Image: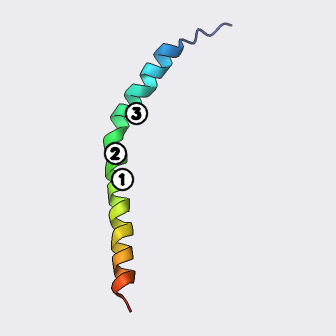
Amino acid sequence: MFLDMDLTQMFTWTQSILDAMMPVIYITLGISLAFIIIKALKSAFNY
């Protein structure tokens, strides 16, 4: 049994999946960054 692996096709497929996932990743990173900033502000003003 011989599997024909076309590297350019695999990279194209991976790139299209990453392009589709980027908005989700950006939203998740933005929300987590907002929580980190809120936590830092709370601890800074909580004596």
The quadrant the C terminus occupies is: bottom left
Measured in 3D between alpha carbons, the distance from the residue under mark 3 to the one under mark 1, in whole angstroms, is: 15 Å
Corner quadrant of residue 39:
bottom left
The percent position of residue 7, horizontal first and vertical second, equals 53, 15
- Residue drawn 36% across and 61% down? 33
Measured in 3D between alpha carbons, the distance from the residue under mark 2 to the one under mark 1, in whole angstroms, is: 6 Å
Instruction: Say which residue label 3 marks.
Output: 18
Label 1 neighbourhood size at 10 Å, few (<14), some (14-19), many (20+)? few
Element at label 3:
helix
The quadrant the N terminus occupies is: top right
Measured in 3D between alpha carbons, the distance from the residue under mark 2 to the one under mark 3, in whole angstroms, is: 10 Å
> Is 10 placed above or below 32 here?
above
- Labels 2 & 1 near each other (Cβ < 8 A): yes
2 or 3: tag closer to the N-terminus: 3
The percent position of residue 41, horizontal first and vertical second, equals 34, 77
Judged from this view, the residue extending furthest toward the bottom is: 47
3 or 1: tag closer to the N-terminus: 3
Instruction: Say which residue label 1 marks.
Output: 28
- Labels 2 & 3 near each other (Cβ < 8 A): no
Instruction: Say which residue label 2 marks.
Output: 24
Q: Label 3 amino acid?
A: Leu
12 on left or right of 41? right
Q: Label 1 amino acid?
A: Thr
